[in-house]
Image: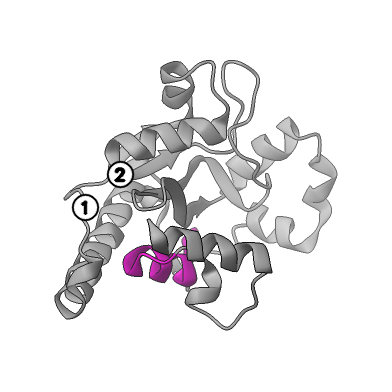
């Protein structure tokens, strides 16, 4: 499920981003609560508030771990986490997660991850970005050595302010259903196929 919304220049802030995230998370909690009433076995002990943390704060907290392991550790501690500033380089020179430099603003992007205690793993449920402005587009393309892209029609539209400022996000519906219903594999919630080793793995989990 995707959503895109036009915003004003004044809305291009971290505060607006957090406000939107809190609204989405509130809806997620309400959905989970309604499902658990119908199916009590799906009840989860979810935090009332989502935790906000930057990728640099994660690196400072777990300097010897990979970005992937940092996400796992922070999610296991807080269960619901919003990681901000995915794209830009950290103090170590490492990039937490790759993002294209010409669609989302590197200072206003995030990933939403949840800890799945049943299978001891994390699930990324959503990503959200406030889209680039004419200023951040140039800055990010310059950092990426891709200024030649400014000649393209899409980029010209941004530079000339022909496109509105916007915020955009998607929610991985299959992952959301997997998390809410405590399922292990995506094939359990959508039409798909599974390798024999996956089916055997599921059978072993059911025995635990």
For the residue pair 67 and 143, the one nearer the viewer reads as 67
Q: Is residue 120 above or below residue 6?
A: above
In front here: 188 or 168?
Answer: 188
The stretch drawn in magenta includes residue 189? no
Frontmost residue, 201 versus 165: 201
Q: Is 74 placed above or below 24 here?
A: above
Percent of width and height locating residue 72: 45, 37
Residue 110, position as x, y percentages in the image:
46, 45
Specify the quadrant that holds the C terminus: bottom left
Q: Nearer the viewer, residue 154 or 66?
A: 66
* Whole-percent x, y for residue 34 in the image: 18, 75
Q: Earlier in the sequence, mark 1 or mark 2?
A: 1
- Does 173 lie within the magenta span? yes
Q: Pointer 1 and pointer 2: residues touching (CB < 8 Å)? A: yes
Residue 42 visible? The answer is yes
Q: Is residue 132 left or right of residue 70?
A: right
Mark 2, Cα crowd under 10 Å, few <14 / some 14-19 / many 20+, is many
Question: Is residue 162 something one can see in this rendering?
Answer: no
Choose top left, top right, bottom left or bottom right for residue 77. Answer: top left
In the picture, the disc for residue 79 is 2
Residue found at x 40% / y 57%:
8
Q: CA distance from mark 1 to mark 2?
A: 7 Å
Residue at image location 49% in from the left, 66% down from the top: 203
**Extent of the magenta region:** 165-183
- Looking at the image, residue 133 sits to the left or right of residue 177; the answer is right
Residue indicated by mark 1: 46
Horizontal and vertical percent position of residue 3: 45, 70
Residue at disc 1, secondary structure: loop
Outermost residue toward the front in this view: 207
Of helix, strand and loop, which one carries label 2?
loop
Task: Identify the residue at horizontal 45%, vertical 53% (top origin).
Answer: 123
């Amino acid at each position: 499920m995707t959503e895109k919304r036009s915003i004003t220049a004044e809305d291009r802030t971290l505060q607006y981003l957090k406000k939107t995230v809190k609204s989405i998370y509130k809806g997620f909690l309400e959905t989970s609560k309604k499902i658990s009433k119908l199916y009590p076995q799906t009840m989860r002990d979810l935090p009332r508030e989502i935790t906000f943390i930057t990728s640099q704060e994660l690196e400072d907290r777990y300097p010897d771990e990979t970005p992937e392991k940092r996400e796992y550790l922070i999610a296991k501690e807080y269960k619901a986490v919003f990681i901000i500033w995915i794209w830009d380089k950290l103090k170590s020179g490492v990039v937490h997660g790759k993002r294209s430099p010409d669609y989302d603003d590197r200072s206003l992007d995030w990933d939403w991850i949840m800890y799945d205690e049943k299978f001891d793993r994390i699930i990324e449920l959503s990503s959200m970005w406030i889209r680039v402005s004419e200023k951040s587009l140039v800055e990010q393309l310059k950092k990426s050595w891709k200024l030649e892209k400014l000649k393209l029609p899409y980029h010209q539209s941004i530079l000339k302010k022909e496109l509105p400022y916007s915020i955009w996000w998607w929610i991985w519906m299959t992952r959301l259903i997997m998390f809410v219903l405590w399922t292990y594999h995506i094939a359990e919630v959508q039409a798909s196929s599974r390798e024999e080793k996956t089916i055997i793995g599921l059978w072993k989990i059911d025995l635990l």
